[in-house]
Image (spheres, rainbow, N blue to C red):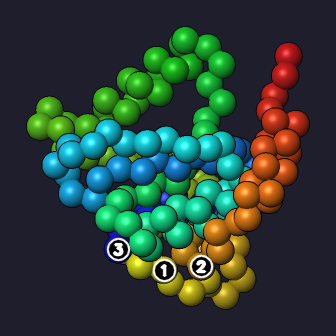
Amino acid sequence: MGALVTVQLAEGAPEYALPWLITFGPLADDGSWEPVVCGPYERAHALGLAGAVAADDEVVAVVEPMWPKVSVDEIRAELAAARQWTGADGEYVGDPFDDDPYAVGSYVASHPEPADGDGADAAAGEEAPEPAEVRAAFGRIWAALPRD
């Protein structure tokens, strides 16, 4: 059994509308294989797929929004922020969502849990979608991407 990690968002957070990615990596920090990034997906599909894989395999599945950075400067700013959140020894020293009014923490599950009361932000409990559902969602994601 693996683990699923995702960001919990406050109800109505704009990140819900973003495309989401899944990064699968080894459960042990032994570097035995390189992480695999999959997506983009709608959030519910990402959670369902990640949960199904993590339930059966010794992997950590990280589900996170895909931030639409469109310039080198935006990307460099994100890299600088990520470096700032890591100490000299490589340990995590800060929360990237400290100043985000929509963030309410993070969620880590080593096994599926039932959905919460309203189901709005349950990371576990999402069913893995059928391939046709995921393909249809690709079209919705593509249509929602910002264009100049």
Q: Report the residue marked by disc 3.
A: 1
The front one of 6 and 55 is: 55
Can you give x and y, in whole percent of width and height, for residue 3 in the image? Answer: 38, 67
The front one of 58 and 96 is: 58
The front one of 145 and 8 is: 145
The residue lying at 65 percent from left, 43 percent from top is 40
The residue lying at 43 percent from left, 42 percent from top is 36
Mark positioned earlier in the residue sequence (2 or 1) = 1
The answer to the question of whether label 2 and label 1 lie on touching residues, with beta carbons closer than 8 A, is yes
Q: Report the residue marked by disc 1.
A: 112
Q: Which type of secondary structure does the marked residue at label 3 adopt?
A: loop
The front one of 100 and 136 is: 136
Q: Which type of secondary structure does the marked residue at label 1 adopt?
A: loop
The answer to the question of whether label 3 and label 2 lie on touching residues, with beta carbons closer than 8 A, is no
Amino acid type, residue under disc 3 in the picture: Met
Q: Report the residue marked by disc 2.
A: 125
Q: Quadrant of residue 148?
A: top right
Q: Is residue 60 above or below residue 115?
A: above
Amino acid type, residue under disc 2 in the picture: Gly
Can you give x and y, in whole percent of width and height, for residue 99 in the image? Answer: 50, 46
